[in-house]
Image (tube, rainbow, N blue to C red):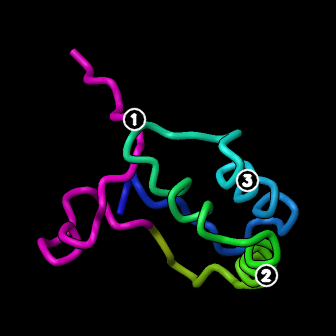
């Protein structure tokens, strides 16, 4: 659900490997709660490589889009509110 869940399918393997590795080692961070770091720290390097390879090999389904923040209640309940900075309010 926007803005909290990044689209990872089909991204380059080396990019995913580097980003997940950076989350795991603490070189990449987000606003609290830093869910990506929490998940990545549970992964071993070989797990990150396998995950990056799998994600990179997946095709993004046609017509895919992230659920908007005003999604139906069931979808909203699934969001964990991980550390994405809130967009600035416009006057």
Between the C-alphas of marks 1 and 2, the distance is: 29 Å
Looking at the image, residue 1 sits to the left or right of residue 78; the answer is: right
Q: Secondary structure at mark 2?
A: helix
Mark closer to the chain start, 2 or 3: 3
Residue for badge 3: 19
Residue 67 included in the magenta stretch of the image: yes
Q: Which residues are magenta?
A: 66-91
Identity of the residue drawn at 23% across and 74% down: 75
In the figure, is residue 65 to the left or right of 1?
right
| Residue corresponding to mark 1 | 85
Crowd class of label 2 (few under 14; some 14 to 19; many from 20; radius 10 Å): some
Query: For numbered disc 3, what is the local secondary structure?
Result: helix
Q: Earlier in the sequence, mark 1 or mark 3?
A: 3
For residue 15, the mark is none
**Spatial CA span between label 1 and label 3:** 18 Å
Q: Position of residue 63 (x, y in %)?
A: 51, 78
Relative to 81, residue 75 above or below: below
- Residue at position x 16%, y 78% from top? 74
Quarter of the image holding residue 16?
bottom right
Q: CA distance from mark 2 to mark 3?
A: 14 Å
Q: Nearer the viewer, residue 30 or 3?
A: 30
Is the N terminus in the top left, top right, bottom left or bottom right quadrant?
bottom left
Residue assigned mark 2: 50
């Amino acid at each position: 659900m926007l803005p909290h869940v990044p689209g990872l399918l089909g991204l380059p393997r080396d990019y995913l490997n580097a980003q997940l590795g950076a989350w795991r080692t603490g070189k990449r961070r987000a606003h609290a709660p830093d869910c990506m770091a929490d998940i990545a720290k549970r992964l071993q390097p070989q797990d990150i490589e396998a995950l990056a390879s799998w994600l990179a090999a997946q095709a993004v389904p046609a017509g895919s889009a992230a659920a908007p923040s005003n999604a139906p209640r069931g979808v909203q309940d699934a969001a964990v509110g991980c550390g994405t900075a809130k967009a600035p309010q416009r006057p």
